[in-house]
Image (spheres, rainbow, N blue to C red):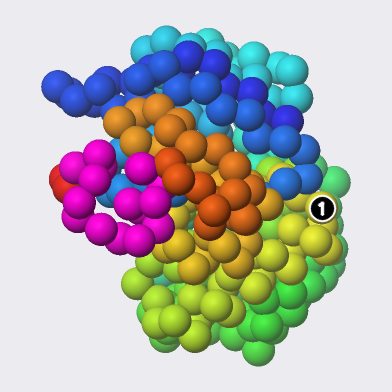
């Protein structure tokens, strides 16, 4: 479980996170909804230790990670996989080399044959085993996201973080990504946090949904509870209305 209490972060003059409290339960897929600029990606970067909070606590399975050094964070980070916006593939490497990179850098005891086996297996999971020798520049946006997911799963993570996994994709390709996220969660029993503003994606992958606004969690419930809610903020976000308590950025 991930346990966050009182998380605060200021970037320049803007208070991005304002005493945020959030629990992520073991084995669930938690979707974090919210308008652009409300701190969703900043939250993910804090969970994995890429950003340091101004105040607050983050516990991963009971271990406090706030205040740890980079060296101390490394074993914690190895328990995570992350799918970045735009997939963040290295264009100088092939697809297979991108997926293998973390294993070659961090997985002690894996020989080259095992790394190759895992690369092929992970690419098979996302339906791209034939693309191992290609460079990322030759891939479509959806294919790049799928390679990014294969790379995120390369080290058998306990947790997977997704930063806007369907942004910029057409509806059919977005559904492919959503089904992969849901399928991997069921197959591998990982704990997942998905940041998105895509309502359809949220309903497809979520076990639980929270709404983040002005640096705090404003709503927390199951997908069915979000459909039935009378909460003004959640209703406005679901309906995509400009009228309501959420102010356009």
Seen in the picture, residue 35 relative to 186 is either above or below; the reply is: above
Q: Quadrant of residue 211?
A: top left
Asked whether residue 113 is in view, the answer is: yes
Q: Residue at x 74, y 58 (%)?
A: 185
Image position, residue 25 (x, y; %):
72, 36
Quarter of the image for the C terminus: give it: top left
Give the magenta part as a residue range: 232-247
Asked whether residue 148 is in view, the answer is: no
Image position, residue 53 (x, y; %):
41, 18
Residue that badge 1 annotates: 189
Q: Nearer the viewer, residue 201 or 139?
A: 201
Q: Is residue 189 covered in magenta?
A: no
Seen in the picture, residue 122 relative to 25 is either above or below; the reply is: below
Q: Nearer the viewer, residue 24 or 137?
A: 24
SS at circle 1: loop
Q: Is residue 121 left or right of residue 159?
A: right
Q: Residue at x 83, y 63 (%)?
A: 187
Q: Residue at x 37, y 13 (%)?
A: 54
Q: Quadrant of residue 169?
A: bottom left
Image position, residue 113 (x, y; %):
83, 67
Number of residues whose C-alpha sits closer than 10 Å to that of mark 1, classed few (under 14), some (14–19) or many (20 or more): some
Q: Residue at x 40, y 82 (%)?
A: 170
Image position, residue 174 (x, y; %):
49, 76
């Amino acid at each position: 479980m991930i346990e966050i209490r009182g998380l605060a972060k200021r970037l320049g003059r803007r208070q991005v996170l304002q005493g945020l409290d959030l629990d992520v339960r073991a084995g669930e897929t938690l979707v974090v909804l919210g308008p652009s600029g409300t701190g969703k990606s900043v939250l993910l970067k804090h969970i994995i230790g890429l950003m340091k909070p101004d105040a607050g606590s983050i516990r991963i399975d009971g271990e406090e990670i706030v205040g740890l050094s980079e060296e101390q964070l490394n074993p914690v980070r190895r328990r995570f996989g992350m799918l970045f916006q735009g997939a963040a593939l290295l264009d100088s490497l092939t697809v297979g080399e991108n997926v293998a990179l973390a294993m070659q850098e961090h997985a002690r005891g894996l020989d080259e044959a095992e790394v190759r086996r895992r690369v092929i297996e992970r690419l098979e999971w996302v339906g791209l085993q034939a693309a191992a020798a290609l460079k990322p520049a030759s891939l479509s946006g959806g294919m790049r996201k799928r390679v990014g997911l294969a790379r995120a799963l390369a080290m058998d993570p306990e947790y997977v973080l997704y930063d806007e996994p369907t942004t910029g994709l057409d509806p059919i390709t977005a559904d492919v990504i959503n089904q992969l996220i849901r399928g991997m969660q069921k197959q591998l029993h990982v704990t997942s946090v998905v940041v998105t503003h895509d309502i359809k994606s949220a309903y497809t992958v979520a076990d639980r949904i929270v709404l983040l606004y002005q640096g705090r969690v404003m709503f927390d419930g199951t997908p069915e509870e979000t459909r039935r809610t009378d909460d003004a903020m959640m209703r406005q976000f679901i309906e995509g209305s400009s009228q309501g308590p959420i102010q356009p950025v």
